[in-house]
Image (cartoon, grey):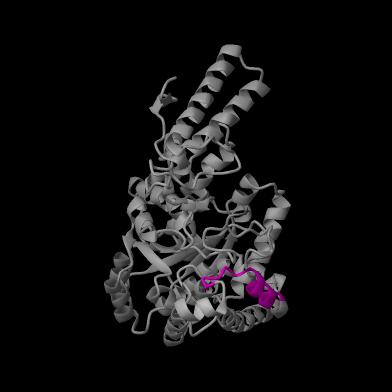
Amino acid sequence: MADVLNGKPYPSTPQELFKSITAQGEIVRSLKAEKAPKDEIDSAVKQLLSLKVNYKEVTGQDYNADSPPTNSKPDESGEPGTTEGEEDFVDPWTVQTSSAKGIDYDKLIVRFGSSKIDKALVDRIEKVIGQKPHHFLRRGIFFSHRDMNNILDAYENKKPFYLYTGRGPSSEAMHVGHLIPFIFTKWLQDVFNVPLVIQMTDDEKYLWKELTLEQAYGYTIENAKDIIACGFDINKTFIFSDLEYMGSSPSFYKNVVKIQKHVTFNQVKGIFGFSDSDCIGKISFPAIQAAPSFSNSFPQIFKDRTDIQCLIPCAIDQDPYFRMTRDVAPKIGYPKPALLHSSFFPALQGAQTKMSASDPNSSIFLTDTAKQIKNKVNKHAFSGGKDTVEEHRQFGGNCDIDVSFMYLTFFLEDDDKLEQIRQDYTSGAMLTGELKKTLIEVLQPLIANHQARRKEITEDIVKQFMTPRKLFYDFQ
């Protein structure tokens, strides 16, 4: 059988092959449903079977739609190999790793072509802002960047820039992992004193999920309350719903169209893995997520200025959107956005497990009570400890895979205390139960304080944040 698909060589990695098989299967089903000519269906089926044969040759396993590849084909010794098949898979909708330690971020930096946030950059940020950098920077939670030095240059030269981040509102309840970009963005806004726009991609969630438009917009309002509860300044922050704002802002929509004109269907297929059977809404959506990267999308804030650079703090899985944006920007006469990438927040069951809003035990949700937090951590937090107290005292625990310790790196601000916990747990002086107790004592007040602030956020306050308006700053 041919080793080409739509005129191109077959994908070489298990993950790419898996996606190609899934897409080709959808094509076959579509052709059969449309009662296409028999030779056309037969050709599509032949391609599908050929892909599945290729998949088995690469992975050593039959294709299973419910089991995406994580490990490579075993080598001659019968042990799993260390070829590309074991590499992590990251895109805006899927994050997969077979390692209990989580994603290998150094490899991801190389694959995505971004730059590591090294000590020299953290030191420069400290010098520029005149204070200790956020612990997310000090601990490598935000670990990768694009053009952050350009942002620091602009700040030192008193040139303006602005912040842009977002949230895809797929459920009413957010979990603690969703807070990470907002906690950090709040800090950036405070130390640099710059405007912030927050995009609520309710249109995306309508296109990808089984939601009505009304449900998607309802989730936007509820999620906005949690975001506002992080402490954002209403005079410096504009939150907007795509479903609402794009219809009322000609400037925003004009930028969407400019971006759409300069990105081909082949490019979005290559970047995002879209198939011919994806709805056209998905294919056009990346331009909508790109548009807030350009200042004249918000004339009420920046007037007609097109030269104000944007800094985007986000999780690394969103980078494909902004690689596309950075490629388009010079073609339409705008500066490339800069980015700061965060690592992923692990599920309670371990770093190789995906958090899910449908599984209440996969994470700590912002609606959880103190008792629920305690029970979840004690019952479900994956432990790096040994099986018995005696073994643990002798050999110590593994902080690299222990979820309670991972969570503390996000939420315990005291560096010295965190390092002491690491040493005590690694040496066996601290037991798993004691580590979990420490995490519970950190999370309970954090969540309770957030809930208290959220209670104060009325529908009217949300409306004020989401009203297009001039902010605190003057742009000529």
Q: Can residue 238 be seen in this view?
A: yes
**How many numbered marks, from 0 up?**
0
Range of residues picked out in magenta = 372-386
- Residue 9 vs residue 149, the one in the foreground: 9
Q: Does the magenta stretch include residue 81?
A: no
- Residue 18 vs residue 329, the one in the foreground: 18
Q: Can residue 464 be seen in this view?
A: no
Residue 420, above or below 86: below
- Which x, y percent locates residue 226? 63, 70
- Which x, y percent locates residue 202? 62, 54
Q: Is residue 458 left or right of residue 176?
A: right
Residue at point 54%, 77% (across, down): 233
Is the N terminus in the top left, top right, bottom left or bottom right quadrant?
Answer: top left
Q: Is residue 381 magenta?
A: yes
- Residue 76 vs residue 163, the one in the foreground: 76
Residue at point 46%, 35% (across, down): 265
Residue 3, above or below 423: above
Q: In which quarter of the image is residue 296?
A: bottom left
Residue 301, above or below 216: below
- Which x, y percent locates residue 137? 39, 73
Q: In this view, does 476 lie to the left or right of 366?
A: left
Is the C terminus in the top left, top right, bottom left or bottom right quadrant?
Answer: bottom left
Q: Is residue 336 left or right of residue 209?
A: left
- Which x, y percent locates residue 89? 46, 49
User: Which secondary structure class fits the magenta region best?
Assistant: helix
Q: In which quarter of the image is residue 36?
A: top right
Q: Quadrant of residue 34?
A: top right
